Image: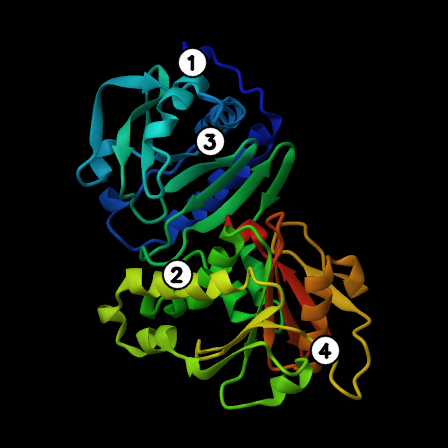
Amino acid sequence: MQAIHTTTYQAAQAVAGSIELHFSRLLALEKQPKDGMPPLPPAKHIAFLLDTAFWASLRREEGIPPKISLAYLPPEQVPHPLLFKEHLPLRAPILNKIAPGVERPGIHLGVWHDADGLYVWGTTSAVPSLCMVVDVSEPGLLVIKHRRAKGLGKFANVAILKGDEVKLIDEHAAQIPDCPSVLTSLLKFKGSDIWDDSLNIMVQLAVSMRAHKRGGLLLVVPAGSDAWRYSILQPMLYSVQPAFSALADLIKTAPETYAQEAVHREVDLIAGLTAIDGATIINDQYELLAFGAKIGRLEGQEPVKEIVLTEPVVGGKATRTHPSLNGGTRHLYAAQFVHDQRDAIALVASQDGRFTIFSWSTCDEVVQAHRIDALLL
């Protein structure tokens, strides 16, 4: 019986209390009627759910590891649930058996409980705001997240578990001086004007860049200025003239008229170009200016000698290091570009999934490197 099941994944036991506290705090701040709010997951249920999901992630069905999304809520709280006639016990072998049918993005297995413990009641394509969701992303990797308070934008990540490594997202990291807006957006658990009044294009670009798994470098420069060209080796093989403005034109329309599929298509087009060797360049109005560009050092400028590394996780500390110790050639060139062009930012995706935003800190007079892959999973 599930009631006597022992949680053997130690990371699940270690983090369950912190996750319960996080959701308790978020739900306490909500102003909607109590009967419309998602349930608060208790630590014992969180630990069991994570334990089961972890061991399921290490199994394979017909040689393929599972990709599963588990939503903690009763079926009564979702519109049009797909209900199983008989509840399925929450067990790793059962999750693996049904995983091939529910691995598409946006499909969640509903998990609830009775006197015998947790069970799977069916599937749903919609979950309420602030409902706890556990994603099995790859073997040994779990992401705990929830929909944002008003339902728009990327789900907010709460914690990442990878084997015995646990990362709790620190929402207060958005309060550091000179924090880039893309990082601030990802850390806004309660939603923000950035999410609610428009699609957050920078976040979508970051997610899409990471998704192609080839690595990439995106430079974002001020519109109306050509100063960035002095940091690019000439001639540029893939210059775009006139600037490609399909994405910019979509963003200028009123938010209620957004064609989200059209926006995603244009985002993927630009993000796809970052897979080409060199840097893709857009302005802060999201107009495409060039791709495959080679970065050089601005004439008269010193080579960048130091950067400050940050990661928005609980217990993470900013560290100063030489840029060559932070990653490969893309990271070094991105740091140099931001060092020379201080009103620009650079987004760097690594082939191994790491993602870093480079920006200039006017407070500390140094290049900041914000590692945000934990927010993009």
Q: Of callouts 1 and 3, which one flags the residue occurring earlier in the amino acid sequence?
A: 1
Q: Position of residue 27 (x, y in %)?
A: 37, 48
Closer to viewer: mark 4 or mark 1? 4
Q: Position of residue 221 (x, y in %)?
A: 55, 80
Q: Residue at x 23, y 69 (%)?
A: 256
Q: In the rendered image, which residue does mark 4 sit on?
A: 296
Q: In the rendered image, which residue does mark 1 sit on?
A: 3
Q: Of callouts 4 and 2, which one flags the residue occurring earlier in the amino acid sequence?
A: 2
Q: Residue at x 34, y 53 (%)?
A: 30
Q: Of callouts 1 and 2, which one flags the residue occurring earlier in the amino acid sequence?
A: 1
Q: Position of residue 61 (x, y in %)?
A: 44, 21
Q: Of callouts 4 and 1, which one flags the residue occurring earlier in the amino acid sequence?
A: 1
Estimate the spatial distance between the alpha carbons at disc 4 and disc 1, rounded to whole Å. 63 Å
Closer to viewer: mark 4 or mark 2? 4
Could you tell me if the residues under marks 1 and 2 are in contact, i.e. CB atoms within 8 Å?
no
Q: Please tell me whether residue 315 is drawn above or below residue 304 in the rendered image.
A: above
Q: Please tell me whether residue 334 is drawn above or below residue 318 in the rendered image.
A: below
Label 3 crowding class (10 Å Cα cut-off): few <14, some 14-19, many 20+? many
Q: Please tell me whether residue 327 is drawn above or below residue 283 in the rendered image.
A: above
Task: Give the residue furthest to the left.
Answer: 80
Callout 1, which amino acid? Ala
Callout 4, which amino acid? Gly
Estimate the spatial distance between the alpha carbons at disc 1 and disc 2, rounded to whole Å. 37 Å
Q: Position of residue 355 (x, y in %)?
A: 60, 56
Q: Of callouts 3 and 4, which one flags the residue occurring earlier in the amino acid sequence?
A: 3
